[in-house]
Amino acid sequence: MVNHADLSLWHATAGDSFVPRPALPGDRTVDVAIVGAGYTGLWTAYYLRRQSPSLRIALLEREVSGFGASGRNGGWCSSIFPAGWRRIVREGGTEDAVARLQPVLNDAVDEVGRVAAAEGIDCDFSKGGYVSVARNEAQWARAQAEVEAARSHGVDGVLTLLSKEEALGRLQASNVLGGTFNPHCAAIHPARLVRGLARVVESLGVTIYEGTTVTAIAPGRAITDRGIVSADAVLLATEGFTPSIRGHRRDLVPMYSLMVATEPLPAGVWDRIGLAQRETFSDKRHLRIYGQRTADGRIAFGGRGAPYHFGSRIRPAFDRDERVHAMLRRALTDLLPGLPKDVRFTHAWGGNLGIPRDWYPSVWLDPRTRLGCAGGYVGDGVALSNVAGRVLADLVSRRESELTRLPFVARRSPRWEVEPLRWIGVNAVTRLFASADRAEAASGRPSRRAGWFWRAIGH
């Protein structure tokens, strides 16, 4: 039996008992079957039901809603898109592809907040923006290049270049040379959002079957350990758990991202740290870190660095890695000298996220088979899943809209390589980023190897 309060800080403070809903009682026939009761599945059900109140919708969830990344993430509801702007233009086929996509992503942050407020979901939504500091010359060069790229693609309102003083005015980090600021980001309590959204879609007439394992999907049906659900449209919304579905092992790589959280900090400590507007924060290193000031005054802080496990294995034991958690605690205390030397860390957790072979998210629905899928968010899925859910709702309803013409719609990423090539390649990239960050911190010069990788995937 899973003790859900032990899954993360967010689960422990969600104010929810996590009692599982009833499992699928046998074969059923519905209009739409959605596999996965995380953000993507729930947003899709929400907008479908709002569009067509008579639709019969079933959500099929192996654990409980919000068990995976939707309940454990860093709590950034941001307008960030994982693929670079050059790649978006190339994939979108038009120079205005970024100019069409970015405003939708910006608005999605507000849409999440609007729905949460309208539906009575108390998820600690606070739109304080996102500050990213540059802490060596190589990072400062990247900060300037990012702002120039935004300007050149017609989205200069997304990123502002910060001087050293301006950056320190938001986050009192160490060794700051400057930074960037993105106003389109909110800090949230992710588990409260996903659990609240599940309750809302239930109230709209959607049935959520928990404790129901989907083993395979096919045109017109989702095959589970408790029966077959027949449906006109079958949608896969399993993100990092997608490799567990038969025939989909190589669609996404389940990469683990780990987090730690401090005890609630007194006001005097926050005076030394900043984040007065609950800005989310990071620096410009390659091996990504991310943090937020929680509504109850903690720092929730995470980062990459955990290994990819051979064969796309997913295990509860992989949620915790003391080596990585210790690294995160050191990284946070190094980043924020205003933290007390004896600051107590109360929680450590992790979970997997879905990474496509080309680092490019996708949403699609095959008009012939009526099989669809959304995901591959590379850790930036809180707001993006809202957009994906609206796109899937329009595709299922056969509605053409501005959303269905976005550059990440109706595309599929290439599949990952077979093992052991997948294991070798993914872990090699993690090691490359870690070594590049160390070299840049020592020399101040941008890493050529890391730069080559980002250019290769279109950043």
Image (spheres, grey):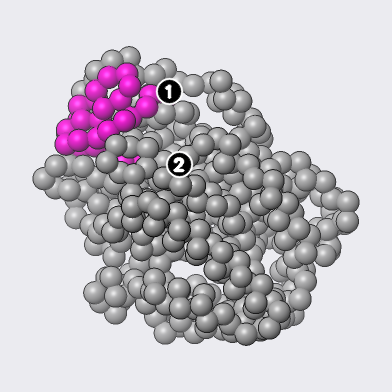
| Residue 143 at x, y percent in the picture | 58, 79
| Residue 313 at x, y percent in the picture | 45, 41
Question: Is 191 in front, or is 422?
Answer: 422
Q: In which quarter of the image is residue 350?
A: top right
Residue 245 forms part of the magenta stretch:
no
Tell me the tag on residue 211: 1
> For this view, does 176 lie left or right of residue 306?
right
- Work out which quarter of the rendered image holds the C terminus and state it: bottom left
Q: Are marks 2 and 1 in contact (CB under 8 Å)?
A: no
The residue drawn where x is 24% and y is 45% is 372
Please give the residue where the numbered disc 2 appears in the rendered image: 313
> For this view, does 115 lie left or right of residue 290?
left
Image: magenta residue range: 210-238
Mark 2 / mark 1, whichever is N-terminal = 1
Q: Which amino acid does label 2 sit on?
A: Arg
Foreground tag (2 vs 1): 2
Q: Quadrant of residue 221?
A: top left
Residue 230 forms part of the magenta stretch:
yes
Q: Which amino acid does label 1 sit on?
A: Gly
* Neighbours of disc 1 within 10 Å: few (<14), some (14-19), many (20+): some
Secondary structure type for disc 1: loop
The residue drawn where x is 69% and y is 76% is 441
The residue positioned farthest toward the left in the image shown: 368
| Residue 308 at x, y percent in the picture | 50, 51
